[in-house]
Image: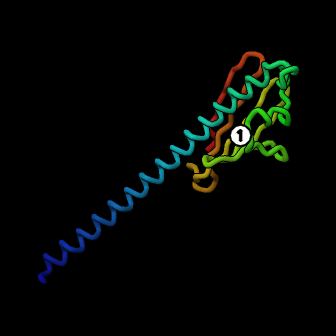
Amino acid sequence: MGYQQILMLVLGVIIIGLSVVVGLTMFTQQMVNINRSSIISDMNIFAGVAGAYYKTSANYGGGNRIWDVDNMGFWFGHNYDASNNSISNDNGTYIFSAEGDVLTIVGTGTQVGNDGSENVQATLQLTGQNGEIVTTINN
């Protein structure tokens, strides 16, 4: 083989290697974005269920316009863990807490977020009286 052929072979290997690295980086970033969107979607579903609990009369097992995270867990279904007020699924783990008229849901995903060390995380706050939802992306 001549020098030109070896140079073309080395150049081809470098280009293919760079293409693979760029493709993996794009795939990983897309997985992070999908996980972030999934936990936000899950939190919105939980907020809808929690809002129904909040507005339902105590006679029907609801909160009667009071956030009671322990009792509200039964509304979420079989995978609610009352010991730490959380729900886990394939997308992540969601922790519920209430202070006054505001229910807070913190969702932590399964993919490492933008900072490179912590998993994807978002916070949803639901105000009971007016139903206002504020979502914040933490990572």
The residue lying furthest to the top in this view is 130
| Residue drawn 78% across the image and 25% down it | 53
Q: Is residue 130 above or below residue 2?
A: above
Q: Where's the C terminus, which quadrant? A: top right
Please name whichever residue, 23 or 42, is drawn nearer the observer in this view of the structure: 42
- Where, by quadrant of the figure, is residue 100 drawn? top right
The residue lying furthest to the bottom in this view is 1
Q: Amino acid at mark 1?
A: Val
Count of numbered tags = 1
Q: Which residue is mark 1?
A: 106
The residue lying furthest to the right in this view is 59
Q: Give the image location of residue 138, x and y in percent.
A: 64, 41
Q: Is residue 62 above or below residue 114?
A: above
| Residue drawn 85% across the image and 47% down it | 83
Q: Where's the N terminus, which quadrant? A: bottom left
| Residue drawn 73% across the image and 44% down it | 79
Q: Give the image location of residue 91, x and y in percent.
A: 61, 46
Colour mapping: rainbow
- Where, by quadrant of the figure, is residue 130 drawn? top right
Q: Give the image location of residue 41, x and y in percent.
A: 59, 35
Other-residue count near label 1 (Cα within 10 Å), few / some / many at <14 / 14–19 / ≥20? many
Q: Is residue 111 left or right of residue 85?
A: left
Q: Is residue 22 above or below residue 109?
A: below
Q: Give the image location of residue 115, x and y in percent.
A: 59, 51
Q: Secondary structure at mark 1?
A: strand
| Residue drawn 38% across the image and 61% down it | 21
